[in-house]
Image: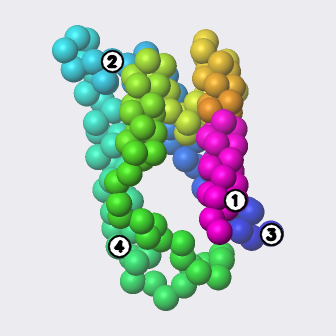
């Protein structure tokens, strides 16, 4: 039960931070990304603030023997750059630039009824479902192709 409470509290704090910072406002994000136009640098300060909190916390956790609410840390192990990573990054960046939203802020913005957010979240769900089934299909094909 404690891991669930911890995850919920973390998500709530994250959502509040996204809302207070303006990251749930697609127009503000688009203006931040529009370097050649009506550039709004305020989100750079949000990112610097997030990095200044995350970096020391991450370093502290790397020195810890075990996490508080689970049996082991699950650090990323892959270091290769493959085509799915590049394609995913391109889709993420294009989607972020066109909509002014990425998944975290979109979820935090759902209760606000900002125009376009519901469509973004629904599209995100469809894309995640397609990606999930594509991976399952690929794994199935590879399993059946091996002798």
Q: Is residue 34 left or right of residue 103?
A: left
Q: Residue at x 50, y 42 (%)?
A: 17
Residue neighbourhood size for the residue with mark 4, other residues' Cα within 10 Å, grouped as few (<14), some (14–19), many (≥20):
few
Tell me the tag on residue 126: none
Name the secondary structure under disc 2: helix
Q: Is residue 132 above or below residue 95?
A: below
Q: Residue at x 39, y 83 (%)?
A: 63
Residue located beneath label 4 in the image: 59
Which residues make up the magenta segment? 128-147
Name the secondary structure under disc 4: helix
Q: Nearer the viewer, residue 61 or 85?
A: 85
Q: Residue at x 73, y 62 (%)?
A: 5
Name the secondary structure under disc 3: loop
Tell me the tag on residue 31: 2
Q: Quadrant of the C terminus?
A: bottom right
Q: Nearer the viewer, residue 145 or 94?
A: 145
Residue located beneath label 3 in the image: 1
Q: Quadrant of residue 57?
A: bottom left
Question: Mark 3 or mark 2: which comes first in sequence?
Answer: 3
Front position among marks 2 and 1: 1
Question: Mark 1 or mark 4: which comes first in sequence?
Answer: 4
Q: Is residue 69 left or right of residue 34?
A: right
Q: Residue at x 62, y 32 (%)?
A: 127
Is the C-beta separation of discs 4 and 2 under 8 Å?
A: no
Q: How far apart, in angstroms, are the residues tagged by discs 2 and 1?
A: 49 Å
Q: How far apart, in angstroms, are the residues tagged by discs 4 and 3?
A: 27 Å
Q: Is residue 144 magenta?
A: yes
């Amino acid at each position: 039960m404690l891991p669930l409470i911890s995850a919920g509290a973390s998500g709530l704090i994250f959502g509040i931070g996204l809302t207070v910072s303006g990251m749930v406002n697609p127009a503000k994000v688009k203006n931040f990304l529009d370097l050649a136009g009506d550039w709004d640098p305020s989100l750079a300060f949000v990112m610097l603030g997030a990095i200044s909190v995350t970096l020391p916390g991450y370093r502290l956790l790397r020195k810890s023997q075990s996490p508080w609410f689970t049996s082991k840390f699950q650090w990323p192990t892959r270091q290769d750059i493959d085509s799915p990573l590049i394609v995913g990054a391109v889709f993420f960046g294009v989607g972020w630039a066109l909509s002014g939203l990425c998944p975290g802020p979109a979820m935090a913005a759902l209760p606000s009824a900002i125009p376009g957010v519901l469509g973004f979240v629904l599209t995100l769900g469809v894309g995640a479902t397609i990606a999930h089934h594509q991976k399952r299909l690929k794994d199935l094909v590879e399993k059946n192709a091996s002798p």
